Structure formats: C-alpha cells, structure tokens
Amino acid sequence: MTHTPHEIHEEFPEYAEKITELKQNDAHFSRLSEEYHEINRQIHRAETNVEPVEELAEVEMRKKRAALKDNLYRMLKET
C-alpha cells in the first residue's frame, strides 16, 4: 500500500481542465470535490500515522472516498 494522496487531478489527468471548470461553475461538483479532498486528507493522515484511526474507520473512509470518486467521474463523463 502506498501512502501517496489520491488527488482528484492525479486520478483523472485527462479531465484536469474539466475538473477546474466544474469546480468553478458547478456547485454540486465543487462540494463533492471538497468532500473528496477532505476525506482523502484524512485517509492520508491515518495511513502515515499522523492521526491514526482504527482499521474499521479507515476502511469506511476509503469506501466513502471511492463512492465520491465514482460520483465525480460520472459527472466528468456526463459533461
């Protein structure tokens, strides 16, 4: 397992311009993007033991991040 943050621009580099555009012009996308960023930071801090959490909590955070990522990707493809 790597301890590299999964930034949304790095996850979908082919959509980098669209991500920037949607963050500025689509309130829903912007909110989901911020939520993704926050949960991603929490996971990174947990993985690097900056702010350790129980394993089950980390698993739940990863599930939430995956669901957010799926929603963001769906929105990117649809626009």
Image (spheres, rainbow, N blue to C red):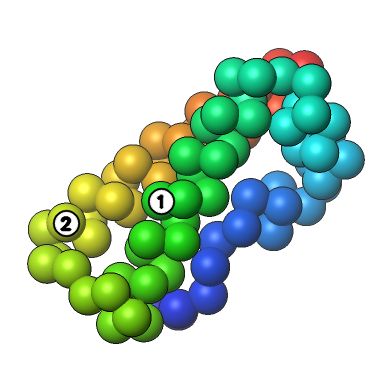
The numbered mark, 1 or 2, whose residue comes first in the sequence reads: 1
Where is residue 60? Give x, y as percent: 22, 49
Q: Nearer the viewer, residue 39 or 68?
A: 39
**Helix, strand or loop for disc 2:** helix
Residue position marked by numbered label 2 in the rendering: 57
Where is residue 14? Give x, y as percent: 82, 46
Q: Residue at x 12, y 67 (%)?
A: 54
Q: Nearer the viewer, residue 38 or 64?
A: 38
Q: Nearer the viewer, residue 75 or 53?
A: 53
Res. 77 in view: no
Q: Residue at x 18, y 68 (%)?
A: 53
Q: Residue at x 55, y 61 (%)?
A: 6
Where is residue 32? Give x, y as percent: 53, 31
Label 2: how many Cα within 10 Å (few below 14, some 14–19, many 20+): few
As drawn, the residue found furthest toward the right would be 17
Residue 66's disc number: none
Residue position marked by numbered label 1 in the rendering: 39
**Amino acid at circle 1:** Ile
Q: Is residue 45 left or right of residue 49?
A: right
Where is residue 56? Give x, y as percent: 12, 58
